[in-house]
Image (cartoon, rainbow, N blue to C red):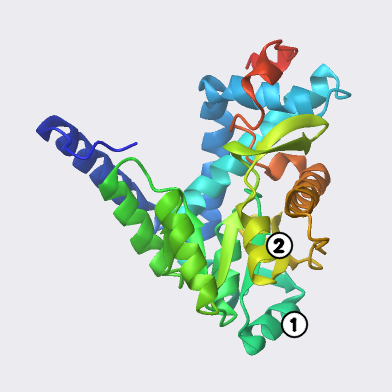
Amino acid sequence: MTSPNPSFARKLAWRLEALALDTASLLLRLLPIDWVSALGGAVGRTLGPLTPSHRVAAMNIALAFPELDEAGRRALLKAQWESLGRTFFEFPMNDRLRPISGRIEIVGAERLAEIAAARKPVVFVSGHLCNWEIMPSVIVNAGIDCQITYRAANNPYVDASFKRSRARYGVKLFAPKGGDGARELLESMAKGESVALMNDQKFNGGVRLPFFGHPADTAAGPTRLALRFGAVLQPMSVQRTRGARFEVVVHPPIELVRTGDRKRDLEAGVSAVNAFIEARVRERPHEWFWVHRRWPKEAYAKDTSPSSRP
């Protein structure tokens, strides 16, 4: 959490960090996007295994795919670093990856058109799949008023840079996570605006339900919003087809059970979201964000992953 009264040294460090990021982004934007994406993949493959996050990714893969042998785990580790490297390097270029660019195929675009025309609030849900910033771009470019959630960067100057970058491809509505964010989302849906949330990361205090066969603390927010407002829970996913080209899929809505038992209905909805995310990860495991500690600490107590070595 950012200190409310940072020191001069901290502010200076923040500004230097933001300047370095902006400079790197500016230089990358001078290059063709396919070059930038390929460069990111090469950097990810080379430097990713040298970071502490490599061991986290290896443990996660061991938990999710215990049937994989050593060679399979190493291959998946390498592939996910390339995917993540491409994604990070593409972020400054995402305004060139809008639907109008011709680089994005949308499966189920008619569903987005229906949502835009109906002007009724919808809860979009997805995970950190491939270049996940493609999805909010597709949503807002479909003409849907949508509140996009995100986790604010600790560095406020970097955070401001991220906001400016997103504004270039049409994403201008933000609701930081936490108490204030939840209030903003409620107000938005009450006004008839849709909301979009990532629902695949650990959420302390969330509902503990299976994910890849292991109990995982999962945010109930998307399901709770959909139940409260009688809204559709609309899943989406994105995958890379080749280079800096993508396919965004608007999946069939997740059917929520409304029995009147609030706790049971909520758990059923969260379980359905977990099942959706898991299915997408199993389809294209190298494109998920493996470097996040998704499961509780006790799941990592026994590291069964020899692949944690580069």
* Farthest-out residue, left: 8
Residue lying at 80% horizontally and 62% vertically, measured from the top left: 256
Query: Relative to residue 87, is residue 273 drawn left or right?
Result: right
Task: Pick out the residue farthest to the front.
Answer: 260
Above-or-below relation of 209 to 268: above
Q: CA distance from mark 1 to mark 2?
A: 13 Å
The answer, for residue 248, to whether it is visible in the render is no
Residue found at x 76% / y 40%:
285
Exactly how many numbered labels are in the figure? 2
**Residue 239, can we see it?**
yes
Q: Secondary structure at mark 1?
A: helix
Q: Look at the image and tell me in which quarter the C terminus lies.
A: top right
Which amino acid does the dot numbered 1 rest on? Glu
x, y percent for residue 53: 55, 25
Q: Residues within 10 Å of mark 1 (few under 14, many from 20)?
A: few
Q: Which label's residue is closer to the chain start, 1 or 2?
A: 1
Which residue was labeled with disc 2?
236
Q: Which mark is residue 110?
A: 1
Classify 10 Å Cα crowding around label 2: few (below 14), some (14-19), many (20 and above): many
Across and down, in percent, residue 6 comes to 17, 35
Q: Nearer the viewer, residue 283 or 181?
A: 181
Q: Amino acid at mark 2?
A: Met
**Residue at left offset 45%, top offset 60%:** 183
